[in-house]
Image (cartoon, coloured by chain):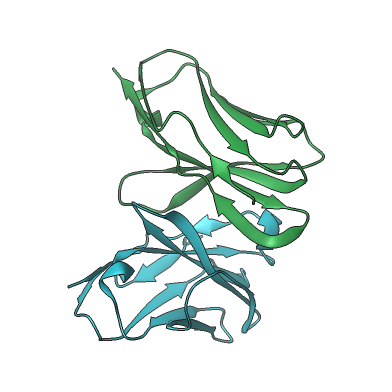
Amino acid sequence: KQEVTQIPAALSVPEGENLVLNCSFTDSAIYNLQWFRQDPGKGLTSLLLIQSSQREQTSGRLNASLDKSSGRSTLYIAASQPGDSATYLCAVSWQTSYDKVIFGPGTSLSVIP
Amino acid sequence: KAGVTQTPRYLIKTRGQQVTLSCSPISGHRSVSWYQQTPGQGLQFLFEYFSETQRNKGNFPGRFSGRQFSNSRSEMNVSTLELGDSALYLCASSLGLAGGLAYEQYFGPGTRLTVT
């Protein structure tokens, strides 16, 4: 069964700290993986999309890596800011069920000034 | 460029009623996907429309249906509402078929549906 998990469910860090968010998935034959952020009561904002042939993607202070063999992706946020406070979700699609996308439950991040 | 818009933003309905939600994609985007988000089940895919045709469908009962118009605007309908249908309904648009995360999706702010 294809599943996506994100641990921890919540994380609180002081401003300026570098942090890592985790996304784990079963079945390593993924197609694509995408990281989103969601602000309270709002829609999702796409952060980074990693194709299965890629190892990482970077955008500004964000870096997402993909390790298919271990079934894991990490989102690295450098020099965290209070504006980074949001829920971060990862979404995964698989080669064997191309049109099926499963979202993880998310990690709620609070960056304390 | 205007983003994805959803109307209405908030809705309160009674069990047994039906509801129609609307989504206007970003100009030029031909795909619209719908999602349901609840605290218990998280974010779940409902269906995707591309060029007025449903291309992908999630695991939801037939009470959930949708359609897409020639201008790519989409509507989602839920009939015979149940308490468990209370959720945030999100739509997302993309240039091409978003199945498998092939294209980046842009999300609207959502419609908060409360069923009493």
Residue A69 to residue A27: above or below: above
Where is residue B54, by image quadrant? bottom right
Q: Nearer the viewer, residue B63 or A39?
A: B63
Q: Nearer the viewer, residue A91 or B63?
A: B63
Residue B102 to residue B115: above or below: above
Image hue for chain B: cyan
The C terminus of chain A, quarter of image: top left
Give the percent coordinates (x, y) of residue A19.
Answer: 49, 18
Q: Residue at x 36, y 31 (%)?
A: A85
Chain with green colouring: A
Q: Nearer the viewer, residue A82 or A52?
A: A52
Query: Is B62 left, or right, of B83 in this rendering?
Result: right
Q: Residue at x 64, y 32 (%)?
A: A73
Q: Residue at x 48, y 30 (%)?
A: A7
Q: Nearer the viewer, residue A74 or B26?
A: A74
Query: Is A101 left, or right, of A6 in this rendering?
Result: right
Whether residue A60 appears in this view of the structure is no
Where is residue B84, by image quadrant? bottom left
Give the percent coordinates (x, y) of residue A15.
Answer: 36, 15
